[in-house]
Amino acid sequence: MSRALLRPFGVASIWPLALVGTAAAACGYGVTRADGSFALAVALSAGALGVILLVSRTRPTWVASEGGLGDDADRFPAAPRLAFFGGLLLLGQLSVRPIQSITAADYLFMLALGLTLYGLLATNQVRGLVPRGMIAGSALFALGALVTAAASDQGTSWIGTVVRLLYLVLVWTWIATIVLRRMRDIQIGTALWVISVAASGAAAVAQLVVGDVIPGTDLAFGRMTGTAQHVNDLGGSAAAALPAAIALALQATTSRVSVLIGISGAAIITTGLILSGSIGGMLGAAVGVTITAIASRRLRSLGLAVGLIAAAVITAMHVQETGGGGTLGERIAFVSGPSGTVGDRLDVFRLAWGRIAENPLIGAGIGVDPRASDSPLPDVVHSAFLSVWFHGGLLALLGLIVLVGTALRVGIQTVAEAQDSDERLLAASFLGSFSAYIAFGLGEPTLYVRYGWVAVALLLALRATQLRSRRTGRDRGS
């Protein structure tokens, strides 16, 4: 290939581009075609080897901790950012899975990863933010899964779960800090995320009024799924997106379009949350909105937002009654009743704790279905932290705690170092959104779903813009 064609990408030969393509193809094949088998391990190893060879030959500095992130490059190709925006716009459409049961959003995020690696060949000094705590937590989680697999002779079935989590919390968030380089990019990404979840909420209204009209979904006991595959996914995604929608509605310097997206999005998302019947999602949303109000110091403005949410709740409950779906009061009575889900889940918690007490260090196996015939549990453990301890052992639990703690620490730092009230409100909303997901996860076996970690990706991108701005100011002052 002519060097003139390669020059815009900063390489002198075709081999780096071919290597990236081969690595991405190997990883993609392994993830989509192998179900935790030997082929998956081989494919992932080939992809990792390709990346290592690329790094060793080009010597890039693509990853930095908070202290090493500066204004390394003001320009980066727009294509990765556009692909990432497309993924955010489809983030709430979990039922849209064109090929191999992978969501349309995942395909766009994979495209964003490939385009980002491609663009980094041209701008070798561009850096993305990866906090050390995220690396340490990921390493602990993977080590716990490995120790458990070795002790229980589990084989390689745990690899797929670990890879998905590491990709989500390290690679995907790293991409966000590279492609979302300005405050405006982060605001657009937030608006697209809100639109996506609001569209799912609107689909839930359509399900209530018209019936089961969304392909790939399964309604249950008068509860709606929207464009999510499960009712609790609608509840969890709505709880995480609600603080971000409120922030868009209250920002003073954004356009009228963003304000409209925030106001309408908050109302529709709340409606979808009620129609999902997810009590954990509702409690998570309350936690998220409360933390957003406290961290942003906008109690009066957020009081108006709470009024809007209350109006949406009343409207949704009225629509439920007229549409024939189960009402919120009936759902609460069923959950808390003597034969409700709370009692069943507490029974599972006691059984899981009994297994943990026998051997706290070694779990039952990451990726193992506890409902199997030889399992002591009749159902999955509906708690992210307890589930990780049961499956992965103590080291995996510590890894998850470090990951969550690091994300919350970065969120608090980002709020504290915000340059103006709008930036503070946006940072506080991301902190509130992730807190809502954590609260939701206390009652659900959720771990590596994007709608829970999207707030962390946007939060790290915002933190990266702060650090670049601070570094630029220091350089100009010296």
Image (cartoon, rainbow, N blue to C red):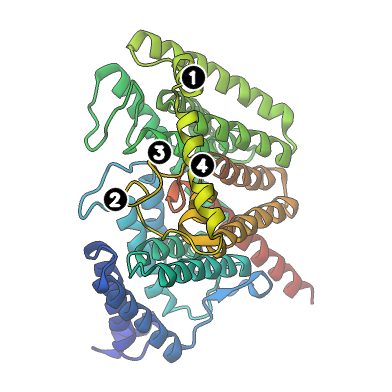
Tell me if residue 227 comes above or below residue 54 in the rendering: above
Q: Earlier in the sequence, mark 3 or mark 4?
A: 3
Q: Which residue is mark 2?
A: 104
Q: Earlier in the sequence, mark 3 or mark 2?
A: 2
Q: Which residue is mark 3?
A: 233
Q: Earlier in the sequence, mark 1 or mark 2?
A: 2
Q: Is residue 213 left or right of residue 257?
A: left
Q: Residue furthest top?
A: 322
Task: Look at discs 3 and 2 and give the one toward the viewer.
Answer: 3
Q: Earlier in the sequence, mark 3 or mark 1?
A: 3
Q: Residues within 10 Å of mark 1 (few under 14, many from 20)?
A: few
Dividing the picture into quadrants, the one containing residue 360 is bottom right
Cα distance, mark 3 to mark 4? 21 Å
Cα distance, mark 1 to mark 4? 18 Å
Q: Which residue is mark 1?
A: 337
Q: Is residue 33 left or right of residue 197?
A: left
Q: Residue at x 41, y 84 (%)?
A: 52
Q: Earlier in the sequence, mark 4 or mark 2?
A: 2
Counting from the top left corner in percent of width and height, residue 403 is at: 58, 59
Q: Residue at x 49, y 17 (%)?
A: 333
